[in-house]
Image (cartoon, grey):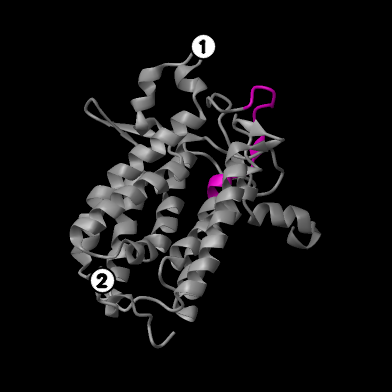
Amino acid sequence: MWPDMSISTAASLLLPTAIPSPSQNVWYIGVFPIRAYAIAIMIGIVVAIWIARRRWAARGGDPDTVLEISFWAVPFGIVGGRLYHVISSPDAYFGVNGDPIRALFIWEGGLGIWGAVALGAVGAWIGARRQGVSFVVFADVVAPALLVAQAIGRIGNYFNQELFGGPTTLPWGLEISPTAPEFPPDLPAGTLFHPTFLYEMIWNLSAAVFIVWLERRFKLGHGRVFWAYVMAYTSGRVWIEMLRIDPAHTFFGLRLNVWTSILVFLGALVAFVVVGRRHPGRETTVLVAAPGDTAHEASDPEA
């Protein structure tokens, strides 16, 4: 049988023809729902903290300091992410058929990374200030951990069957149930879609490895690891966002998040270059320099 089989037929037997979507995204323990989206977010946070603790210790800091700062950064980040999502997608909550109270139902999905990073940074700044450590060093330490957390968080979108890309015939096309709320009504059942959750997972994990290499190769510091993270993430978000077909506000033919990614990338690029010229190398301590003490601000002599 095998000698007479065509290459395309053999390949179809050996390679997957589609990625099936989970049939369930919520489980109940008694009357309490356990949602896959919330589990993915929590696992991402735990893994990010674990990575950040190890990186903080490698910089000479107390790993428990990361936990103390996280107690501020995580709640601020979740609130910021939800605020950005609600503001950028108001119709679902304040439109004609919207339900404002659902803006509080964060467990159903919907966190905007821009709001999460922005307000999370505010929380981290408060936490770092209270611990007497450098917020900039903390930002550099946590940067690759954020990418890993974001990659894990995308698994929640997979379980929710949301935020997928346009139709595709590729063998890794994503199956979406025709009864799913986001299934395009003008497409036939069985249509496969670009698994943008998977694309972003792979991109983020690759970017995390890349910026760790970049940091070690060039002894980056003074916030440049964080700005490298921003550039790496936004450059991937541009092309991944352009694949998605979920409703979104557009300006001049591009989705809001595409414009946001472009502008944030350019801002991060300018910050990366300016900081590099002003502060080559990296800090020798995680502590905040006392007034008049320049030792803590000194660059790594090995840079």
Relative to 238, 78 lies left or right: left
Image coordinates for residue 244, horizontal then vertical, percent: 62, 39
State the residue position of label 1. 96
The amino acid type of the residue labelled 2 equals Ala
If the image is split into quadrants, where does the C terminus sit? bottom left
- Residue shown at the point (53%, 27%) measured from the top left: 180
Q: Is residue 155 or residue 290 the one in the foreground? A: 290
- Residue type at mark 1: give it: Val
Percent across and percent down for residue 184 are 63, 26
- Residue 230: x and y, percent? 50, 57
Q: Residue at x 23, y 25 (%)?
A: 31
Farthest residue in the bottom direction? 302
| In the rendered image, the vertical position of residue 63 relative to residue 146, given as above or below | below
Dot in front, 2 or 1 = 2
**147 within the magenta span:** no
**Quadrant occupied by the N terminus:** bottom right
Residue picked out by circle 2: 289
Q: Is residue 199 above or below residue 141?
A: above
Q: Nearer the viewer, residue 85 or 4?
A: 85
